[in-house]
Amino acid sequence: MAECEVGLDARINALYDAETNAPLLNDAINVVVNTIQKDIVTHTLSRHLKAIMNSWIRTHSWYIDHKIRMSKFEHCLHNVVSREMRRHVIDLLKIRDKEYEYGLGSSVNEDDLALEVLRVSMSEFTSNYFWDINAKLTAEAERYRQSNGECLIDRDFEKTFSWFSKRTMSIHYRLPHVATIPKNVIPLEVLALDFKHDLKWECSICLELDSVNHVNLFTSHCVRTACKHIFHMACLYDCKRIYLQQKENHNKMCVPCPLCRAPIY
Ligand SMILES: [Zn+2]
Ligand SMILES: [Zn+2]
């Protein structure tokens, strides 16, 4: 029994950690990190985390790297999100594998991984009730602080998180800088399985009509992009994977829509 469990875990872990899936995962992690940074209300963060953040601001060391504007906050958030996403996705894949044991669906593969990554990176992952972001982020920032020998002083605990901008000559209470994804990004909308397509709709990636007879849940799901184009989820993810794996696209966070070239995140 124990050996079998180890075998299953190793197979699912290997699927998650496979080099070829890295662009898909990085993409999802970046979107979640950016969404959280954009939406976070700094006064609701823990007192301890705010003290650490105040200390970074006060000592002019908010960024790890000024050039790419990677902040310590973003670095810690990225670590937490990467770990949490891994845990949630692997849990979901294990459930899927259990279903297979009972004769449902097929053995866990890359399509299942893409579906669960999408699920986990959608809205519920960015809201507080799905996982305790406050406690985990505080612990991560505290680890960072300690391992870099940064000290905390009492007065950093007393203030709400704030910083002074020389550009606007005013005090701000949000995060100083939120990276690269444009503010108006609209996430992919996963359509219900019984979604009624236009009569002449076909997926312009695989040129097939939607079919309710698909066995695999992933291939039968469709997604609608911000530019209002609808594709099979699996087809779009294949497109994304192939595009982002090309060397010249390694730094990109979005792919062009196969129909209209609008960015898809
Ligand atoms: Zn398709
Ligand atoms: Zn489009």
Image (tube, helix red, strand yellow):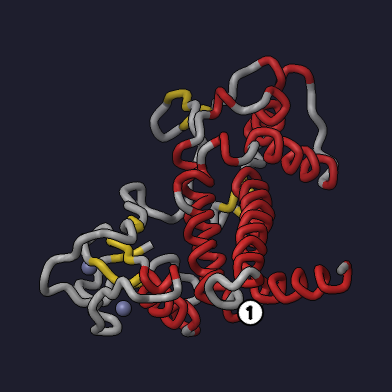
Note whether residue 64 is visible: no
Residue 113 image-quadrant placement: bottom right
Is 25 placed above or below 121 here? below
Residue that extends furthest to the left in the rendered view of this protein = 199
* Residue beneath the point at 70% across and 26% down: 51
**Which corner quadrant holds the C terminus?**
bottom left
What crowding class fits label 1: few (fewer than 14 Cα within 10 Å), some (14-19), or many (20 or more)?
A: few
Name which residue type carries label 1: Glu
Q: Nearer the viewer, residue 258 or 89?
A: 89
Q: Mark 1 vs ligand 1: CB under 8 Å? A: no
**Which corner quadrant holds the N terminus?**
bottom right
* Residue beneath the point at 36% across and 66% down: 221
Secondary structure beneath label 1: helix
Count of numbered labels shown in the rendering: 1
Q: Nearer the viewer, residue 237 or 151?
A: 237
The image position of residue 91, as x and y in percent, is 66, 58
Q: Nearer the viewer, residue 53 or 40?
A: 40
Residue that extends furthest to the top in the rendered view of this protein = 158
Is 94 placed above or below 3 here? above
The quarter of the rendering in which ligand 1 is drawn is: bottom left
Is 138 placed above or below 214 here? above
The image position of residue 45, as x and y in percent, is 61, 28
Mark 1, residue position: 19
* Residue beneath the point at 44% across and 55% down: 180
* Residue beneath the point at 58% across and 53% down: 70
Is 255 placed above or below 85 here? below
The image position of residue 263, as x and y in percent, is 31, 65
Residue 163 image-quadrant placement: top right
Residue that extends furthest to the front in the rendered view of this protein = 103
Note whether residue 135 is visible: yes
| Apparent side of residue 205 relative to residue 56 in the rendered image (left or right) | left
